[in-house]
Image: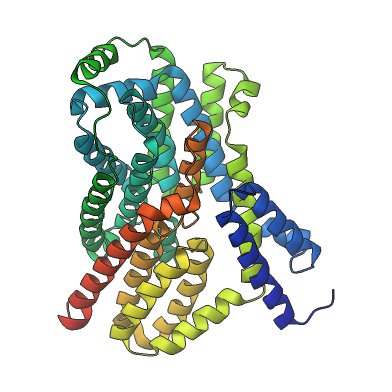
Amino acid sequence: MHLSQNALMGWAIALFVGTYVLIVLEKYIHRTMAALLGASVMMALGILTSKQAWSSIDFNTIFLLFGMMNIVTILSHSGFFQLVADRAVIFTRGDLTRILWVFSLLTALFSAFLDNVTTVLFMVPVMIRVTKQLKLNPIPFVIALVIASNTGGTLTLIGDPPNIIIGSIANKGFNDFLIEVAPYASVAFLLGLMLMQFLMRRAGDLKAKVTPEELQQILHASSQGQFDYPLMRKALVVFALTIVLFVLARPLGLEAGVIALLTSTILALLTGLSAAWIMEKVEWTTLIFFMGLFVVIGGLEHTGVFAIIADHLQVLIGQDIKQGILVLGFSSALISGFVDNIPFTISMAKVLKDMQTTLGPAMDPLWWALSLGACLGGNLTLIGASANIVSADLADREGYKITFFGFMKYGTPVAFVTVTVAVLLFWVTHAVMGLQ
């Protein structure tokens, strides 16, 4: 169309907003089709060439999703999730508040050492089985796991993609995140979980739906299940190997997506299950949604929208680190709630890297403010983080639809509280008390 750079930028923003509106209006169009429409129009207008669109897709994320979906499919086929669900019901004695806390704590812990998507692929099917046994609506409980996953992933270097990006560009290690980010994320997690409990109790989600007699029958049935233990052992061994390789990925020079693709293929070969059957279980709508969304966001990045946002933030921050903590923390959370936090974190991290050459170690608090905002802000909306979309599709497959506004009913207030508490607590510690 031979448009000017400013015109291309305007079209890219308009297409992103249009795609976002269609995703919000999911009653009329599926979010995968909305993402595909936005991506195809982005290329049709010439904002991105097909080659640029292809390169804007983060295939590490796609491979990671694909590989872990296959591992989870085989684990599910062995009866593993049913086994965990049965044991969870027995352990909690069907107490709904205890179920909420136990599963949320486990999810946060797993997310600190795995990526968020792997954790929800693992935990959401278990939660759905437990709630279905107790005749509950799984949706609020699934959203609680998503929130716990995103918050728990903030704790460590390897828990959330923004932290991995920050660690790489800023040359920060695992212990740096444990010291500078984990304490504030931990406080945010506990407050967020208490708020989630309050919201669910007020909505009647924590009210028992089974009689004591029915509960006893469920507890008895939970100890009588039949499972394919040989298949389960193979799947768990490969799953454990995958986790170990995730932890060792950086020293080995391997990406998480490559590891998941390799280990899931090895597991499929070991089990002898039909490749066609395994492929049918893959959440293809989720993968294609992410590919389309990556292209739409790639249009914003390619036309310089993120660079302009980062430049404006740099002007606002200047050399005032105290103000920078607040500006960067809250703006990162807001932006990450509505666009993928990976390209934004990359753009902002490059700006901070430039600032570091003049300010030196004094600007280190800005790295941690970026981490807290980008990771915790993912709970703001349904498309704020990859784990949100994956969990929604897992629930949809079981017949439970998590709508955009249905997610915001819980996610938005929890995100507001956790971001506010974590960023302000971090600001008080570093800016007011002068601790580093």
Look at the picture and state if 384 lies above or below 82: below
Q: Residue at x 59, y 25 (%)?
A: 278
Furthest-right residue in this view: 1
> Residue 392, relative to residue 420: is it above or below?
above
Q: Position of residue 114 (x, y in %)?
A: 38, 44
Against 131, residue 229 (above or below) is: above
Q: Give the left or right position of residue 51, taking residue 1 as reference.
A: left
Location of residue 434 (image quadrant): bottom left
In the image, residue 59 lies at what x, y percent? Answer: 60, 50
Foreground residue among 301 and 391: 391
- As displayed, is residue 334 above or below residue 163? below
Screen quadrant of the N terminus: bottom right
Count the numbered circles shown.
Answer: 0
The residue depicted at 66 percent of the width and 71 percent of the height is 14
Q: Is residue 119 left or right of residue 298?
A: left
Q: Where is residue 85 drawn, in percent x and y?
A: 32, 25
Whether residue 159 appears in this view of the structure is no
The quarter of the picture where the C terminus appears is bottom left
